[in-house]
Each structure stands twice: as structure tokens, then as C-alpha cells.
Image (tube, rainbow, N blue to C red):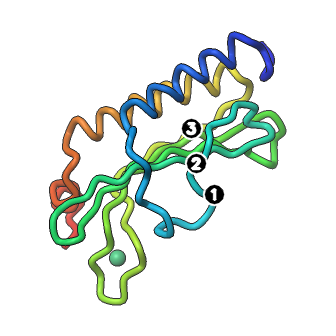
Amino acid sequence: MEWDGGDVRTRFLTLASQWHSRHPAPSSGGGRIDGPQPGQWMWHPPAHSIYDSHTYEGPDDDWLEVAIRIENADYSPGHCRIGASLAVACRCEGGHGQHTVVETLWRSGGPTAALEALTTVLRSTDQWLAGSRRPDWWRRTAGLA
Ligand SMILES: [Zn+2]
């Protein structure tokens, strides 16, 4: 299978629409994370990065953010890294933005492996959020103040 194959693109768009249907609201995570900003999902990982996130607001300005990322592994052409993370607002004195409480990262060579990794990563985010969508719950689970 090639990166630009029709079947590959169709599977990717199906996975992208799964994510978007679960996280339909516009992200409010802007400015909290360095790096690529949320945008349109485009296939061809050799050429594009994908970054998207969704924030669940809690009481007292608390928040939980789920983020997904697909990017090139620049040192090996055609490979990409696919990952997701869950983070909560930082409550430290002299805050540093956010604390990652759980994450998963895969590295894949070739489009089939990349799609399988993306499927697994999306399933992980579903499982995390099935546990709870409340920042205070994740904060306690991670042992954060
Ligand atoms: Zn902190």
C-alpha cells in the first residue's frame, strides 16, 4: 500500500471523522501548548503534521485536555509518530501550563501501520475518557494537588 492510495485515504478520513464526532466543539486549548496548532486533518504523514485537541472544562477554571498528534519521524523517511495525551491544568505556584497525566506514543513505517497505530491511539483516548472527563478525577488519579 502507498501513502496516496485511495483505500488508505478513505480509512484515514473515517478515523478522522470518528475523532471529530466525539470531540465536536471547537478546541479551547489554544495557547496552552507549544507546537503545531489544531487544524484540518490531512493525510500524507510524510508531508504534514496533524495536531488536534479538545478541552473539557471543570469548575474553578480547571480543565482536562485530550490531544492527538501525528508527525514525521524526520530521521527515517516514510515513518511517523502517532500519539495522544491527556493533560490537566497546572496548579503549581509559578505555573507551567499543564501536566500530562497519561500518554501513548507509537512509531510506524508505512501507511498500513500508521493507520493501525492511529486506530489504537483513538481507542486509547476513548478508554481514558470513558474513565472520566473530569479534570479533578484525573488530577487525583495522577496524585496532583
Ligand atoms: Zn505545574
Q: Residues within 10 Å of mark 1 (few under 14, many from 20)?
A: few
Mark 2 vs mark 1, CA separation in Å: 6 Å
The residue that disc 1 covers is 36
Residue at (58% x, 48% y) in the render: 51
From the viewer's perspective, is 47 left or right of 51?
A: right
Mark 1 vs mark 3, CA separation in Å: 18 Å
From the viewer's perspective, is 73 left or right of 135?
A: right
The residue that disc 2 covers is 51
The residue that disc 3 covers is 106
- Decide: is 44 above or below 111: below
Residue at (59% x, 57% y) in the render: 37
Which badge, 2 or 1, comes first in the chain's sequence?
Answer: 1
State which quarter of the image contains the C terminus.
Answer: bottom left
Q: Position of residue 84 (x, y in %)?
A: 47, 44
* Ligand 1 position by quadrant: bottom left
Task: Select label 1 or label 3 by which is in front.
Answer: 1
Residue at (45% x, 32% y) in the render: 19
Question: 108 and 7: which one is in front?
Answer: 7
- Decide: is 137 above or below 123: below
Q: Residues within 10 Å of mark 2 (few under 14, many from 20)?
A: some
Q: Amino acid at mark 1?
A: Pro
- Decide: is 86 above or below 119: below
Which badge, 3 or 2, comes first in the chain's sequence?
Answer: 2
Which badge, 1 or 3, comes first in the chain's sequence?
Answer: 1
Q: Position of residue 70 (x, y in %)?
A: 62, 42
- Marks 2 and 1 close (CB-CB < 8 Å): yes
Q: Which mark is residue 103?
A: none
Residue at (80% x, 17% y) in the render: 2
Q: Position of residue 75 (x, y in %)?
A: 81, 48
- Decide: is 121 above or below 35: above
